[in-house]
Image: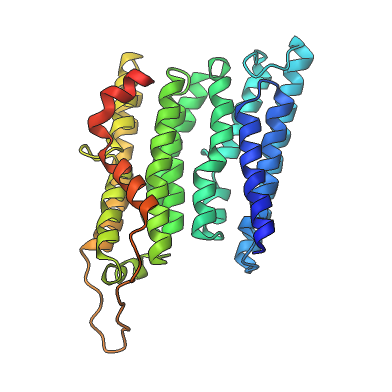
Amino acid sequence: MNPYAKLITSLSLLLGTTITISSNHWMMAWTGLEINTLAIIPLISKSHHPRAIEAAIKYFLVQAAASTLVLFSSTINAWHTGQWDLTQLTHPTSCLLLTTAIAMKLGLVPFHFWFPEVLQGSSLTTALLLSTVMKFPPITILYMSSHSLNPTLLTTMAIASAALGGWMGLNQTQIRKILAFSSISHLGWMSIIITYDPKLTLLTFYLYSLMTATVFLILNTTKTMKLSTIMISWTKTPMLNATLMLALLSLAGLPPLTGFLPKWLIIHELTKQEMTVAATVIAMLSLLGLFFYLRLAYYSTITLPPNSTNHMKQWHINKLTNTPIAIIASLSMLLLPLSPMILISV
């Protein structure tokens, strides 16, 4: 890709995200979302592979429909209340339309169909952007209007997302699709708590982005795309694969690691809100996700490569230590002891 084109798309992504997260007016928020959508499309389709072109078209159509619903929702609200402020969403139809639009933007069930396909058609770095940076503006809009949204609808969508993200990830062999269903499952955890404790949703999103960035950057370094190649990648970079195993277990939410913190806090808050049944169900559904994370971790570190005669031996990558990966990998595993400090700041 042309360096100037890459610079323009990167700056546009930054600009669109900044406009949306700092705006109070619906039109400005919508403009930021549109800039973001148009900026990511060249990055999805840059390989010119038919699957990448298909992913770009799917992404564009879904995001265009979602943006139309955002505009429609804000216009109806302004028509009835005379308010264009993000925090003044009071009309019931507008609230329902906005929830639908943001669910489409994020890939929440039942509007999740596009997300695994688009991630599968993108490169690992673009998939990382789609899983983290592109989710930030819609999460911000959800945060700003959380007091107006229907808790029952969000809880239903959240539990459905956690269930489907777990079930559909079980039989996948493509790592990008597994991480797409992992993202859908984590979005379920974020949306179940948004009406009760919006700051906890943001904390969950930040930690999820940190852990996902670690996994994607390690996979990008080892050039691993599917389970069959992850089994033989440990001979190239043994330490990176050990780190990948810990990052995956952190994403699963196992206690000594960072990923346990948001799930623990969400279950605690749901119990305080007398939603014990919802907390129990979503905690049980996280076991599905734990299964495929454990499978990935097992393949990445414990499975030996096949010893057939036609197998090409993988050699160590003679590279200097990648400092960004080292920093975010440490954070994605070691933040749990700092949880009291994080909670005070939140």
The picture places residue 200, in percent across and down from the top left corner, at 40, 24
Quarter of the image containing the C terminus? top left
* Residue at the far front in the pictured view: 320
Vertical side of 20 occupied by 345: above or below: above
In this figure, what is the number of numbered marks? 0
Which residue shows up at 29% across the image and 23% down it?
341
For this orientation, the residue located farthest to the top is 81
x then y, percent, for residue 323: 36, 53
Quarter of the image where one finds residue 16: top right
Residue 218 versus residue 318: which sits nearer the camera? 318
150 left or right, relative to 38: left
Q: Residue at x 34, y 63 (%)?
A: 320
Considering only vertical position in the picture, is 71 above or below 222? above
Q: Is residue 307 above or below residue 38?
A: below
**Residue 328, can we see it?**
yes
The answer to whether residue 159 is visible is no
